[in-house]
Image (cartoon, rainbow, N blue to C red):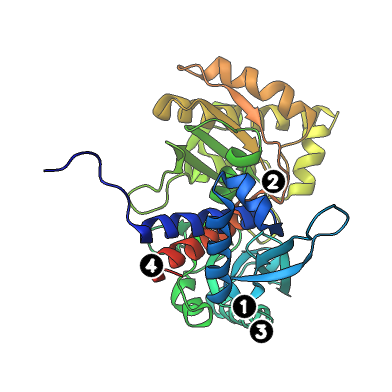
Amino acid sequence: SESGPRRPSLSVVRELTDRHVVDQLLTTPELTRAELAARTAISKPTISESVRRLTEAGVLAEAGQQLGRRGPAGTFYRLRSDVGVAVVGPAGPDGVLIELLDLQGDRLGRSLRPGVVPATRSTLEPLLAEATAEALAGAPGPVLAATLSVAGPVDRATGRLVRLPDSPFLVDALDPVPLLTPLLGLSPVVNNDVDWAALAERSVGSMQGLDDFAYVFLGPGLGGAVVSGGAVLLGGRGLAGEIAHVRTIGAGGQARRLVEVFADLGLRRPGSAALDVERLQLVLDGTTGEDRASRQVIITALAGVIASIGAVLNPQAVVVGGPWAAPPALAEQLPDAVDELAAVSTEVRFADLGADAPHLGARQAAVAAAQEALTSRLISTGA
């Protein structure tokens, strides 16, 4: 009969120790065995054995001697540069940028291809493939994870870009996963830029600590993201959050899709579905009677969409971000306009992170996934 709780096997203890060591070196690039022991509260002999094991397995390498202290000099250890990399790439009106990152998130290389707007599958696929191949040419190790941030509707279940009416960037469908998988050696996680921005706001921006909120993106295109339980809500076809097509209050009190409100005001770029961001900012900051009238229409239309989000989802808050979310008039008047229309009280916040928020969110996800892939590999191989 058993006399007490079962003790973990030696192999499990080794795996856990190895993971603790690697986790510490993912946050601090170089540490001695004594520092690792102190940080993990694991005995020095056990840490030393783990470091030896990981060095022999090609995961760790010596990084010099500890100087300037009494007693024997300690040896610094670091993760080998060839254990793996992460790849992140935004694709949008400014073109395609593919970045190569180490497991601490530092950039190892980049490749940029200027884009053409509006983009088609035939113009965008070569840019993605060329930029990815060029960036990977300098990779010191295998790709452990990859993310792609795209300025357009994405079916998150498949990674396919979906053509919707009034799309300001991509004017037909695109399937980047089968295009990039042979180059990367794994399937990239493809998501639209607004979802990545929302995750960045939750991680380091204005929505820290919130698990249920909505994100409203104001840029050349109008987008939204819904975070529920800390994860992005996909929807039945992976297209949740396309607020450009939500009906709201337009000029003269008419019911209009949000994107149509801006067309009615003449605030689209000529020959394009994209909004004219520079003109929008001038209107939002303007002092003429025409500017004030247009500004009121815009604020009311946005308030109608946010009030609808509040009624349907009851989020903890709605954050507003994007290239034209900063004018003082918007920050001052939009929350009050939402209060007037909302059946359910809805807090409005403005994003802390700037235009780089989508890229930041995709970078964080790629690095975190690459780190997890490395530690999972250690457990599966017993390295």
Between marks 1 and 3, how big is the CA–CA gap?
Answer: 9 Å
Around disc 2, counting alpha carbons within 10 Å, would you say few (fewer than 14), some (14 to 19), or many (20 or more)? Answer: some
The answer to whether marks 2 and 3 mark residues whose Cβ atoms lie closer than 8 Å is no
Q: Secondary structure at mark 2?
A: loop
Q: Which residue is mark 2?
A: 266
Q: Residue at x 66, y 37 (%)?
A: 205
Question: How many angstroms separate mark 4 from mark 1 (CA)?
Answer: 29 Å
Depth order, front residue of 111/6: 6
Q: Are marks 3 and 4 in contact (CB under 8 Å)?
A: no
Q: Nearer the observer, disc 2 or disc 3? A: 3
Task: Give the residue type at disc 3.
Answer: Ala
Q: Are marks 2 and 1 in contact (CB under 8 Å)?
A: no
Residue 192 visible from this viewpoint: no
Q: Which residue is mark 1?
A: 132
Q: Contact (CB < 8 A) between labels 1 and 3?
A: no
Q: Which residue is mark 3?
A: 137
Residue 227: horizontal and vertical position, in percent? Answer: 47, 39
Q: Residue 82: x, y in percent?
A: 62, 76
